[in-house]
Amino acid sequence: MFDTPSTFGAVMAIALASPATAQTPAPAPAPAPAPTESDTRFVIGEVVVTARSMARSTETILTSVDMLGGDIAQRQSVDNAWELFARLPGVVLTDFNQGTTSGRFSIRGFNGEGEINAVKLMIDGIPSNDNAGGMTGIDMISPLDVAGIELVRGTSDPRWGLNNIAGNANILTRIGGNYLDARLIGGAFGTVDAQASAGLERGGFSQNYLIGYRRTDAYRDHADLDRLNLAGKWFYDVGSTRIGAIVRHSVAHAQEPGYLTDADADTDRTRSYAVSATDGGTRRIGQYSLHLDADLADPLALSVKGYANSLHDDRYVRYSAGVPQQRRLTEEWQYGATAALHYHPRVEFLHALMIEAGGDVQVQDNKSLRWLTDRRTLTSQTRDQDFGLTVYGGYLQAMIEPTDWLKITPAWRIDRVDGHFANRLTGTTAPINDYGTISQPKLSVAVTPVTGVTAYANYGRTFQIGAGSASYLVPPRTTDVAPSINEGYEAGVKLTRGRWLEARVALWQQTASGELKRRLNDPSGDVDNLGRTRRRGIDLQLDLKLVRTVALWGSYSNQTARIVTPDPATPSQAGNLIDHVPQNVFSGGLDVTPAPKVRLSLWGNGQSSYELDPANTQGRYGEYVVLNAEVAYKLTPRIEISAQLKNLANERYEYVWYDGTQRLHAPADPRSLFGAVRLTL
């Protein structure tokens, strides 16, 4: 019987280790046990187990998996939820700092430029990317509602197809329990943030609610942000079956400060040019899902979800004085379902056997419209596209354990793509590219020669298709574009010593047969072909708890992303580095609890510089090291006050890109102080 609802990709439902997660009047769940002998997952923060979901569990994915505890996520002060991923190893953050188009995270040598969004995003197991693979759905998340985050890296996970190019992320939110948790934040740049999360559980019926509001003037001029998030979750246990529904809604209004030239980025970092005076937009997002999890028999579990996602993104933007302002209107509806059946048969000559079959379908109804404007007055329309996209696929996977020290996980996934395209400005229609059946074999192996040491290796294929009109055979193109096939390898070693030491090293490589690169400013929405690419790297991670009151953690990733065989139109790019991919990415921190009522934390993250374009001719930018600190004190068992100092060394850094004529800079926030009061009942 389920104690909490299961989620796609969840090994377990993760609850907070803070008093807010204790389910009164029942005692709080016990801390999670040390990872199993052949576990390749890496845990950051305090994680407690309240239930185990068999279907679609990351326990069957023998690759580099990272888990962030809700105790860390909930106490952060961030403008956008994607910033929470800074605490996970090997993650690159791309901070556009442009209103509702704020930024995103990326992994495994991909960048966050909006050209190739290589991470499949889920919220409680519900797919949450937009049509272009962007992570707009993450805006619906407020940190206080986060129970945990799972990040799966690599190509060996068969559970997902579309957007699962370099891996996937699942944000788990708080479901079940009896609690009231509220947090009020105030601080730099006129920031006010109020969040409240509540749970009520009686007689097998649970209700959870979230309201979050954030208002900030921001560091730069003309950069105000105003966002409201709402969520309701209702679940009911009937014997060994749990059914439920989740509703989320987010609405944000924001100004855009625009980008600065080289000179002004050094001398006048808060400035916003007059050309950006009317830039900004509104983003409304909704997500509505139904959940069914059932133990059909002792060795058999079923998980089914259905959902509808909505996106309305209305943005006015002008990148520089040399181009006119544009209005960009995106309207999307996504309807989908996911299902998985998980079976543990008993076989006499095997230590254990697991067989899982699953599938998903997503139907999209998308509209992309653009106009040239003059201070938000429409002057001419440049785009009016209406296109539908249907992606459906299935997978079969087994975990074979001949002995207790060996796991072999073969898997196979196939996907199909269908759809239609209409250009309502010209009356042109087009069919989908004939992608055929996209076959994706996978294989993973984990060996545990001695207790606490696991060596693992995996191989897998994933795929990329075009975004927007690039998925269709739009004239003058007469030849179908094949999907880009990503082929990846990984080998790693995980070391565990009780609860005091966790370490992992992984070597990996990923190649793409014909990577597509979307033009950011092309009114047609078509793409360039970057060519055959290769990404490779090494990831190092360490989590050390020598004494109960002190925890030390750190990570380092060295990665290289190159164009191996360029598009014939750009032969000079052979061997060049892919833009906006830093070679070195690192993070680390120290958490100290000198007394039961006091918590001290120091953490940071950083990266080396990157190229601005595939030609590698504009110099290297983007290097930074940012440190943050927090001190917290419990006034009472229910009330905690805290102060968080971000960028304590006042590092001057920025996001930089090249528009074809000049380098454009978006400066990051300087040193800033935030205070918070948290009440848990």
Image (cartoon, rainbow, N blue to C red):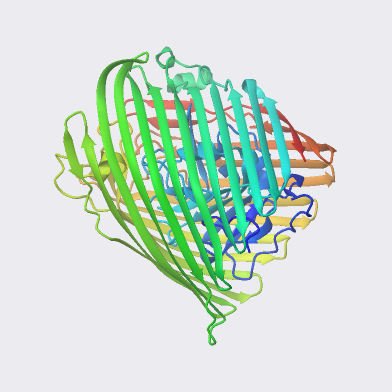
Decide which of 57, 439 is in the foreground and name it.
Answer: 57
Find residue 664 and report its horizontal and vertical position in percent.
41, 26
Q: Is residue 137 visible?
A: yes
Instruction: Give x and y (percent) for residue 286.
Output: 48, 37
Q: Viewed as shown, does residue 681 lie left or right of 627? A: right
On the question of residue 464 being in view, the answer is no
| Residue 344 on image: x %, y % | 53, 74
Q: Nearer the viewer, residue 168 or 209?
A: 209
Q: Which residue sits at x=47%, y=29%?
A: 100
Closest to the observer: 111 or 464? 464
Q: Is residue 314 above or below residue 546?
A: above
Horizontal and vertical percent for residue 131? 36, 42
Q: Count the numbered circles shown.
A: 0
Relative vertical location of residue 39 with respect to residue 87 in this rendering, above or below: below
Asked if residue 426 lies left or right of residue 165, the reply is: left
Tell whether 215 sits left or right of 666.
right
Q: What is the quadrant of residue 181 in the picture? A: top right
Name the residue rendered at 42%, 15% in the picture: 278
